[in-house]
Amino acid sequence: MAEQYHKRLIEPDETIIFDRRHSLWEIWKNFLIGGGAIVALILLLTKFKPGDSGGDTNWGYIILISILALFFIGWYGAWPLLKRRKMPQRNMIIPISIMVVAAGAWGALMWFRNDEDFASIWTTVVWIAFFVVIVGWLVYPIFAWFFAHFVLTDRRLILSTGIINKHTMAMPLEMLNDVRTSQNAWERVFKYGDVVIETAGEFGQQPFTNIGHPLEVKRQIFEQRKIYDDQQETRRGKEMAREMSTTMQTGPAPAAPAPAQPAVKVDELDVVDGLKKLDELRQSGALTEEEFQQAKKELLDKMHGGQA
């Protein structure tokens, strides 16, 4: 599966620096949450069922559904809103919807807590909740983790998510402006966090959430960006030297007849200017010493040939 994934997203001559998924703690965290929810549902199915107290308040039922409602409102509503408040693409609809649904469900469960008709369908309600917990907190996180890829290559950053409907984003390293990381106290303990990529153009600011060892990821991205810039500068330097050498070999465009001696001097001045530019390219690292000597030899041979 991973090999097929790379064949689809990675170009034949592209090198992968790392291929990361979300932190494994994300899966274990969902398992812990799902386990707690299952325990609460078992209690609501057996000991703390609504309508069993003859109209009296069943405090166990009230406490359990209140804890579940507050957890949904806080963990899946308020906390995502707080984390996304400074991001340009905040996607506030899902957290707000979860908060509204959780608050509405809590109100309905409280309203019908001592209703005999509601108590008769309570078992069905709890089994539906069991299904939601198993799929949402135990099964889905495993598939979401497996099919999510955060890839750094020698020229791009790629994010691929989605189980059935795939969403892929590829950002060239040359468009990268900055990389920021974010970790709260909990995330620092388990060594994961968010990586926010700031790029020029249409991508803007893109968050990559729940990535293991985000500071190391940031370091690798900056290192690869520097390597990429150096390679591009070297390539441009070689192209410039090649164009300069070609121009000197072919000579300038035909012009009006002129005395022979000035033409030789102009050619010498062009060669001297070319040597200065080649030396600048060598000092900047765009040309190696061997490449510099080769281009220098070609220019000097051209000058000597012109004087002959």
Image (cartoon, rainbow, N blue to C red):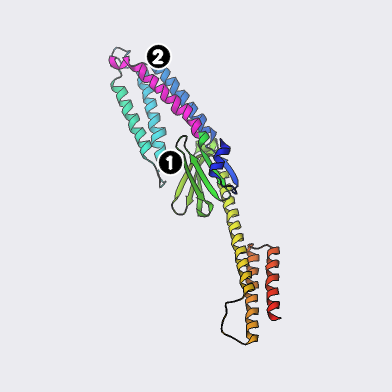
Residue at screen point 32% across, 22% down:
109
Of residues 136 and 99, the one drawn nearer to the viewer in this rendering: 136
- The label on residue 56 is none
Residue 302 lies in quadrant: bottom right
Q: Residues within 10 Å of mark 1 (few under 14, many from 20)?
A: few
Q: Amino acid at mark 1?
A: Lys
Question: The C terminus is located in which quarter?
Answer: bottom right
Q: Which residue is mark 1?
A: 83
Q: Is residue 136 above or below residue 91?
A: above
Residue 216 lies in quadrant: top right
- Residue 161 pos. (x, y %): 48, 39
CB within 8 Å, label 2 to label 1: no
Under tag 1, what secondary structure? helix
Relative placement, left or right, of 174 versus 63 is right
Does residue 282 belong to the magenta stretch? no
Residue at screen point 39% across, 41% down:
91
Q: Main secondary structure of the magenta part?
A: helix
Magenta region: which residues?
115-144
- Residue 65 pos. (x, y %): 37, 23
Q: Residues within 10 Å of mark 2 (few under 14, many from 20)?
A: few
Say whether disc 2 or disc 1 marks the residue closer to the N-terminus: 2
Q: Amino acid at mark 2?
A: Thr
Relative placement, left or right, of 290 versus 49 is right
Question: The N terminus is located in which quarter?
Answer: top right
Q: Which residue is mark 2?
A: 46
Cα distance in 3D space between marks 2 and 1: 38 Å
Of residues 99 and 305, the one drawn nearer to the viewer in this rendering: 305
- Residue 67 pos. (x, y %): 39, 26
Relative placement, left or right, of 114 versus 81 is left
How many marks the image carries: the answer is 2
| Residue 213 can be seen in this image | no
